[in-house]
Amino acid sequence: MTQDLAPWASRPDESRGRRYPEQAAPGRTDFQRDRDRIVHSTAFRRLVYKTQVFLNHEGDLFRTRLTHSLEVAQLGRSIARALRLNEDLVEAIALAHDLGHTPFGHAGQDALNACMSDHGGFEHNLQSLRVVDELEERYPQYNGLNLTFETREGILKHCSRANAEKLEAHDPGGVGMRFLDRTQPGMEAQLCNLADEIAYNAHDIDDGVRSGLITLEQLEQVPLFEDFRVQTLAEFPQLQGRRVLYETIRRMLSAQVYDVIEATHAALRKADPHNADEVRHAAHLVQFSEPMRQASVVLKQFLLKNLYRHPQVTQTTLQAQEVVRGLFAAYLADPLQMQAGFAARADTARAVADYIAGMTDRFAAREHERITGLKLLP
Ligand code: MG
């Protein structure tokens, strides 16, 4: 069970602990328990019906938030093992990192944030933390999943100064602190951030080509893709169709994984941290080499321009935002339209945001149709 951990890895026996102290579990570390709690949570199961880029009803083979999270966990664990980081912690953070996402992906988040502008705003990273700290109702003694500090630290990957100050006021020295004193999270949290990026860059190419919204010819402009496509065809000149795509993406993924391992080893040699806490006061350590970082930026810009802003994607985006806005207005005007537990809460706007954020794409679309009589999405 004990993994051969590097000195800079997070160790469950050195954890800063849980908000509500609990006895150790026989045979499982605290980070394994965190992962298990996340897998059994309600929010985790909902990820299967939440949009990554393509709305859930657009096709069965596109990534959803769930398959995306599994891919982040896989990439994260591979890199973690090579760097001798804590794989259980990486897995826990990766599986939880998108729990706070609204239905309809970033379109849903932007719409909900706009609705909440007079009520403290809405931000999906902060919401992921809220899900595991407050919104899950699975234990008799407390709200949330009562996860360790290290998992919660990794889940809160970005946070505005204003929100960090609110977190600090509520929980001094907690997971908001690093956004105020500008320190780093542990290596495992740093790794999940980069694994997230590697995962979506790769799978959005795959989904983009499958949907027909981007073509292999267009991808010739992207050196990170094109170099491996040329390499693949040099080795397998007869190869055609989707096998070219898959082999190219596979090589691209491997190259990025090895690049992160090498560049992070170099950064570790320079920073020379002796333990997980020294990592927090060092420079950011888990990283691409400079050439790979630049290649990854070019790929991201390509996807932004050609996929995320494709007219067919933005068209459904507008309808999805209309659904979120319609639901928000309706529940705010009549909270009893929500489930009893949400309707009874004192801060109505936040209750509405929590309720909408928890919805799957199809539940949100059905609810909107039930309340307004308008069918905006299939
Ligand atoms: Mg993600």
Image (cartoon, rainbow, N blue to C red):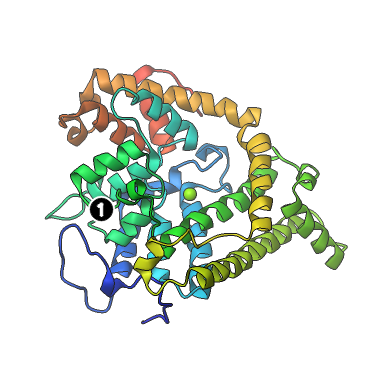
**Disc 1, SS:** loop
Task: Give the x, y percent position of residue 145.
Answer: 24, 55
Dot 1, crowdedness within 10 Å: few (<14), some or many (≥20)? some
Residue placed most toward the observer, 6 or 247 = 6
Q: Is residue 358 visible?
A: no
* Residue drawn at the location 78% of the way across and 57% of the way down: 227
* Residue drawn at the location 33% of the way across and 42% of the way down: 127
Task: Give the x, y percent position of residue 93.
Answer: 39, 58
Where 67 falls versus 375 (above or below)?
A: below
Figure quadrant of the N terminus: bottom left
Image side of residue 296 versus residue 238, left or right: left
Where 215 falls versus 370 (above or below)?
A: below
Where 375 falls versus 184 (above or below)?
A: above
* Residue drawn at the location 83% of the way across and 58% of the way down: 230
Q: Quadrant of residue 100?
A: top left
Q: Is residue 223 visible?
A: yes
Q: Quadrant of residue 336?
A: top left
Give the residue type at disc 1.
Gly
Q: Residue furthest left?
A: 141
Image side of residue 188 versus residue 203, left or right: left
Image side of residue 309 versus residue 137, left or right: right
Task: Give the x, y percent position of residue 41.
Answer: 30, 54
From the Cβ of disc 1, is ligand 1 less than 8 Å away? no
Tell me the residue that label 1 is attached to.
174
Disc tally is: 1
Task: Give the x, y percent position of residue 371.
Answer: 33, 21
